[in-house]
Amino acid sequence: MKRRHALTAGLLLAGASLRGVCAEPLTGKALRDEAVSIAKVLRCPVSPNLTLYESESAIASELKGVIYEKLRAGETREQIFDFMVKRYGEQIRYEPDKNAGTAALWAAPWAAVAAGAVLVFLRMRKRRPAASRTDKNTD
């Protein structure tokens, strides 16, 4: 008897957790807004400097249609991203995913800024003593 109650409770909890995963399909303005927000963060495969939202290429139009279809079917944003990454690779994301493989991409700009700051500091430090020596010689 206890086993049956535990099984029933487990099924109820599983059903409740799946309710959040299988979201209601979007419609109207909510569908359009979500599709546009997804298209703004995915890169066009043909025009790599443009997002799907900005691009007017045929493939971008097709992919925007795929986004709408998947949202109407009830898929989540993450499921759509996963589909696009499987189909086109990680470069489809306008911002690469934050993981160990892309850590260098995220750290490189900060490292460049830090290196630039160190170079500026070192140059300024070299110039100061020279300026103070010329002041002493003119006295």
Image (cartoon, helix red, strand yellow):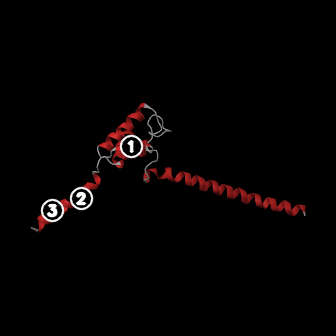
Say which label, 1 or 2, has the lower sequence index: 2
- Frontmost of labels 3 and 1 is 1
Q: Amino acid at mark 1?
A: Arg
Q: Quadrant of the C terminus?
A: bottom right
Q: Nearer the viewer, residue 78 or 115?
A: 78
Q: Which residue is mark 3?
A: 8
Say few, some or many: other residues with alpha carbon within 10 Å of mark 3 (under 14 / 14 to 19 / 20 or more): few
Helix, strand or loop at label 1? It is: helix
Q: Is residue 27 left or right of residue 126?
A: left
For marks 3 and 1 on the same chain, the one whose residue lies earlier in the sequence: 3
Q: Position of residue 78 (x, y in %)?
A: 36, 49
Query: Which label sits on residue 32?
Result: 1
Which mark is on residue 16? 2
Q: Quadrant of the N terminus?
A: bottom left
Q: Is residue 128 left or right of residue 53?
A: right
Residue at 42% x, 31% y is: 58
Return the disc, 3 or 2, that comes first in the chain's sequence.
3
Q: Secondary structure at mark 3?
A: helix
- Amino acid identity at mark 2: Ala
Horizontal side of residue 112 vs 38, given as left or right: right
Q: Looking at the picture, how far across and down is residue 119, in whole percent?
A: 66, 55
- The image quadrant that residue 129 belongs to is bottom right
**Identity of the residue drawn at 36% across and 48% down:** 77
